Amino acid sequence: MTAQAAIVHIGGYTAESGGRAAGIVAARRDPTSGELTPLGTAAVTPSPSFLVRHPALPVLYAVNELPEGQVSAFRAAPDGDLSPLGVRSTGGAEPCHLAVAPDGRYLFVANYGGGSVAVFPLDADGVPGERSDLVHHEGRGPDPDRQAGAHCHMVSPDPGAGPLLAVDLGTDSVYRYDLDAASGRLVPRAPRVRTPAGTGPRHLARHPDGRRCWLVGELDGTVTAYDVAADGALHQRERVEASGRAGHVQPSEIAVGPDGRFLYVGNRGVGTVAVFAVADGTPRLVAEVDTGGEWPRHFALTGAHLYLADERADMIRIFRVDPDTGVPTAVGEPVPLASPTCVCP
């Protein structure tokens, strides 16, 4: 394992968003024990609430979740230190998610407050250029507090040649876009996928085989299974509850284990990670593990471990995942960290 591979960066909310973080924290990960040792704040930047790495370069990108949204790029040193490479306006409010195209040529950003998707070309060093497109979603959902307008919550490029999927909580939709690689503009691919009214779709997870995906509903507490057609169309199979616990369930992150056998869902409100077997595509709840906090906002699977950020409990919790059952078991003590919102191995 390289020194770079043993580094984890953690995003969080700073004072600009009512949080207590100072910026992006670097930590060293022990791949055997899973132990995480914080190394301090690697970059002071406002509310870096979601992070992603370039697929081929030592570059880390962060959204700055502000009323006038920004995206920041950093060169990552082997010791976890971050050097600024540039900051760009996202053209919308409160960007909350971002992703790099598989070929490393473009960066996509989801503007939650703006209900839009921004596109940035990346140069040979991974530095974002002038924004090449900004696509606005229109519409609303039945929840007057959360769905008065469009709220793009995730951008998910297809690892193959399929369309970019943009998950919109406000319009109960998953939009599909093809990227014109020459112009850096998004071409809508109709029709958009509509979820049942009030679902509030937040994030989706793709199966490694590319033929299945699962969508988590933040507002109705569900997981929906889809088959993915060759043209990127999503065909709904089944909907299940995201949690078996009583109480207000507000799902956050969703991810598939590396071997594709298990699906993991973080449930805020009840403070759990639910584990579903998905061998046949239909999610079947096999375990639900307490996290020790109430608000598991994000988690990441890497190696034999799951690293979970609990935003309100100010901690990172480490779990070892049983390779046979897929069930995580907490190891060690929680790592204290202010307002963590994203773990990026």
Image (cartoon, helix red, strand yellow):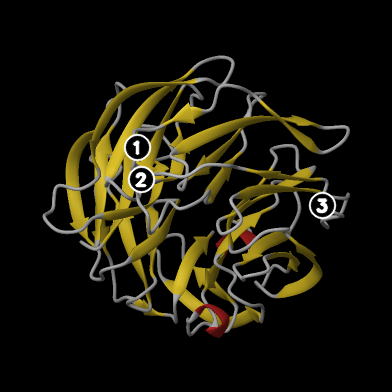
User: In the rendering, at what x and y percent does residue 23 appear?
Assistant: 60, 79
- First along the sequence among labels 2 and 3: 3
Residue drawn where x is 40% and y is 56% of the image: 146
Locate residue 7 relative to residue 237 in the image: left or right.
Answer: right
Quarter where residue 267 is shown: bottom left
- First along the sequence among labels 3 and 1: 3
Name the residue beneath numbered marker 2: 142
Q: Are marks 2 and 3 in contact (CB under 8 Å)?
A: no
Above-or-below relation of 242 to 207: below
Locate residue 283 relative to residue 256 in the image: left or right.
Answer: left
User: In the rendering, at what x and y percent does residue 313 appear?
Assistant: 32, 77
Locate residue 59 relative to residue 24 in the image: left or right.
Answer: right
Identify the element where label 2 is drawn: loop
Measured Cα–Cα span from mark 2 to mark 3: 32 Å
Measured Cα–Cα span from mark 2 to mark 1: 7 Å
Q: Are marks 2 and 1 in contact (CB under 8 Å)?
A: yes
Q: Residues within 10 Å of mark 3 (few under 14, many from 20)?
A: many
Kindly give the residue lying farthest to the top in the view shown.
230
Q: Which is more foreground, mark 2 or mark 3?
A: 2
Identify the element where label 3 is drawn: loop
Of the residues shown, which amino acid type is indicated by label 1? Ala
Locate residue 310 relative to residue 82 in the image: left or right.
Answer: left
Residue in front for this viewpoint, 168 or 49: 168
Name the residue beneath numbered marker 1: 197
Name the residue beneath numbered marker 3: 131
Q: Residues within 10 Å of mark 2 (few under 14, many from 20)?
A: some
Of the residues shown, which amino acid type is indicated by label 2? Pro
Quarter where residue 93 is shown: bottom right
Q: Is residue 326 visible?
A: no
Above-or-below relation of 72 to 289: below
